[in-house]
Amino acid sequence: MPAPKELDPSTSLTALYGNKVRKLRLRAGWTQRELGEKVHVTHSRIAKIETGVESLPRQLSDLLDEVLGADGDLSDLWKHLGYTPPYPNWFRRYFEYEAKATRMYKFSQLIPGLTQTEEFRRALFQAGEVYGVLDVEDKVSVRLGRQALLDGPTPPWLWIILDQAVVYRVVGGRGVMRRQLAHLLALAERPHVHLQILPYESPEPIAMGGSLTILSMPKRDDVVYLEGIRSGGIHEEPEEVAKYAFAYDRMQANALSPTATASLIRKVMEEHYPCTSSDTN
């Protein structure tokens, strides 16, 4: 095994940050792979962070701080890194709001990013390359970092309504879908996660126009985020937010109960994504 790359912490803030992560990891007696498993990222991502190759989202930094017992040092240092995610400005604003939210209400025609498995999101981003060149690994890493929100000491309350078609639309192969649906069921068992499916028999007009997220944050009004295939937008006007909140309430009232939702997902897994010895996807 090659010796780890020597890093001069005086060359940049990312180098200083990476050097501190490495010291804390070695003090804990963990390999890069072991640390990656604890914060839900690949070992190669940990290697890049430790060598100062790239910065990272705040949620991942906070989780590293907690896992490594940095007592806030990593979180404080992160504030000076100037991290810029590989997304347009309007989505960066959404990142900021999402990180502050104490309650999230989502309706989606796709498995929401916060609940995607790594193999599902990689397959999704790879499929998206037909629309242009994407840095798949960077996008996968950013989404993994965002998921740290659900694993922190004070996770937000998360209400999810999925269009029924979501569980039938195959992304990455049947094995990938089976594991993704199993992950959804596991998340739904957490006390702060509430999962429902909007059935085909409930033709809500707003459910045919894309994905909807309502974020509730302390000391400010709720905001709405709408996302389409290649665009998105944030609405902060109280009148507009109220309209979408009403629409969400209608969808929630017409959706299957959490118990019925879990039963439907298990049925779909058995009928459409059975586990077979020849399944390699």
Image: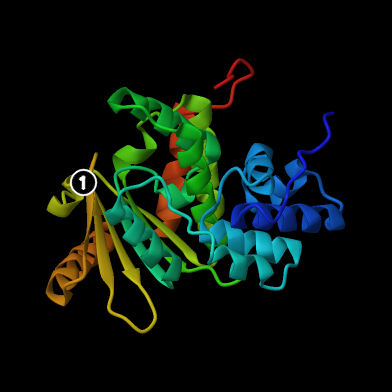
Q: In the image as oriented, which residue stretches furthest toward the front?
A: 11
In this rendering, would 30 be left or right of 57? right
Q: In the image as oriented, which residue stretches furthest toward the bottom?
A: 219
- Give the residue displayed 47% in from the left and 49% down from the top: 115
- Give the residue displayed 46% in from the left and 47% down from the top: 263
Q: Dot 1: few (<14), some (14–19), or many (≥20) neighbours within 10 Å?
A: few
Whether residue 134 is visible: yes
192 in relation to 16, above or below: below
- Give the residue displayed 69% in from the left and 56% down from the top: 10
Label 1 element class:
loop
In percent of width and height, residue 89 lies at 30, 54
Placement of the C terminus among the 4 image quadrants: top right
| Along the line of sight, the residue nearer the viewer: 182 or 264 | 182
User: Which residue is identified by label 1?
Assistant: 201
| Along the line of sight, the residue nearer the viewer: 97 or 168 | 97
Q: Amino acid at mark 1?
A: Glu
In percent of width and height, residue 68 lies at 74, 61
- Give the residue displayed 42% in from the left and 27% down from the top: 126
In percent of width and height, residue 112 lies at 39, 48
230 in relation to 115, above or below: above
In percent of width and height, residue 238 lies at 17, 76
